[in-house]
Image (cartoon, grey):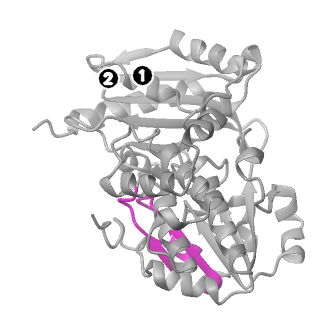
Amino acid sequence: MMTSGAAESTTTGEGQSRWPAKSASWTGNSTPAAAAAFLRAAKRIIVVTHARPDGDAVGSSAALVLTLRELGINASAWYIGPLPRWINEVTSGVPWKMIDANAAASGQLELEAQPDAVAVVDTGAWTQLEEVKLWLKGRGPQTLVIDHHLSGDADVGDLRLIHPDAAAAAEIVALVCMELLGLKNPADLPKPIAQLLYLGCATDTGWFRFSNTRAQTLRLAAGLLEAGVDFTRLHAMVEQQDRPSRLRLLGRSMTGLELVADDRIAIMSLSQKDFEDCRGDAEDAGGFPNYALDVACVRVAAVLIEVAGRPAGAPITKVSLRSKPGQPTVDVAALTKDLGGGGHARAAGVKLAMPLAEARKFMTGKLAAALAAAPTA
């Protein structure tokens, strides 16, 4: 099941990489060599990533932890749930712990962890780091951010290695891992590290099907395969573990599928009752927009999911967007950024402080306007 590492937040309205990134404040100021030197100087490092980690978040963070431990550095990963069902299998041998809101609010993290350095991978947005925000705030000089998203918060870390053209954070982390180990070829990486980096690259490109796949991505993947990656086992481990509830939820979402704007926009939605009836959870619904993009005339697809808000009872709708390259095309990262979310040009997300029905109507209008304004030649 393909999931996106797109940034999300809550709103009431909701070759060489480009350098720096597409934002006045969200800019890179480091290189793989400088990032490696920063990490090598530390004795204890904690690696964190965005909430609800996907394959790229898990793969890139765990690969960095294993690499640091190869050097004798005390490194471990923190994950903010809910976690993918396959995480234990793919992170065998990687020390990690799950962080929840209670641990952060109680000050437990401050008592437990005083690292020399922090690495934040596959995000640089406070909205995706809520459970560790209090702990992470003020650690800017100690923090390295490694990310490939188009937007983020510069004060998350003083040292930022940002390549928005990279297909996955794992592409960038691979360069840092090779610098740390003094390697020139990914084929020379230890197999467990190569396996995790391949996981990140493969999942964030839809197993090398999506338009973010670059020549560099495939060259890296080839080197990782030479290092011994068992890609068929990895694919089965991550993508072929669906539960019957996923099929039931997919059926529900397709039953309510609506095509608008001359059938170029596909809108689907799932309510809390749908999840209860299908005995499923949010992870079961990952990647649903991609099914709609298989329809020739569809240019952009949205799946809206009703989620429990905070405080209890507050209406929240999670929106996942995907679009096709070519013309006309919708830059869903730009669209969601105006609403407080973000991600990539072809995959992004946002959370709207609206009931499901209202959010569906709102997003339909937003997508129709964006498609109408998209260049066609």
Identity of the residue furthest to the bottom in this view = 41
Quadrant that contains the C terminus? top left
Quadrant that contains the N terminus? top right
In the rendering, at what x and y percent does residue 298 appear?
Answer: 32, 23
Asked whether the viewer can see residue 158, the reply is no
Q: Residue at x 53, y 58 (%)?
A: 227
Position of 306 relative to 115 (above/below) = above
Specify the segment rendered in magenta: 141-166
The verdict on residue 146 being magenta is yes
In the rendering, at what x and y percent does residue 179 appear?
Answer: 51, 78
The residue under label 1 is 292
* Kind of residue at badge 1: Ala
Q: Which mark is residue 23?
A: none
Q: Are marks 2 and 1 in contact (CB under 8 Å)?
A: yes
**Total marks placed:** 2
Position of 261 relative to 61 (above/below) = above
Q: Residue at x 45, y 31 (%)?
A: 362
Observer-nearest residue: 224 or 291? 224
Which quadrant holds residue 352? top right
Q: Which mark is residue 298?
A: 2
- On the rendered structure, is 150 left or right of 227? left
- On the rendered structure, is 48 left or right of 229? right
Q: Residue at x 32, y 44 (%)?
A: 331
Q: Residues within 10 Å of mark 1 (few under 14, many from 20)?
A: many
Observer-nearest residue: 36 or 72? 72
The verdict on residue 17 being magenta is no
In the rendering, at what x and y percent does residue 334 appear?
Answer: 36, 50
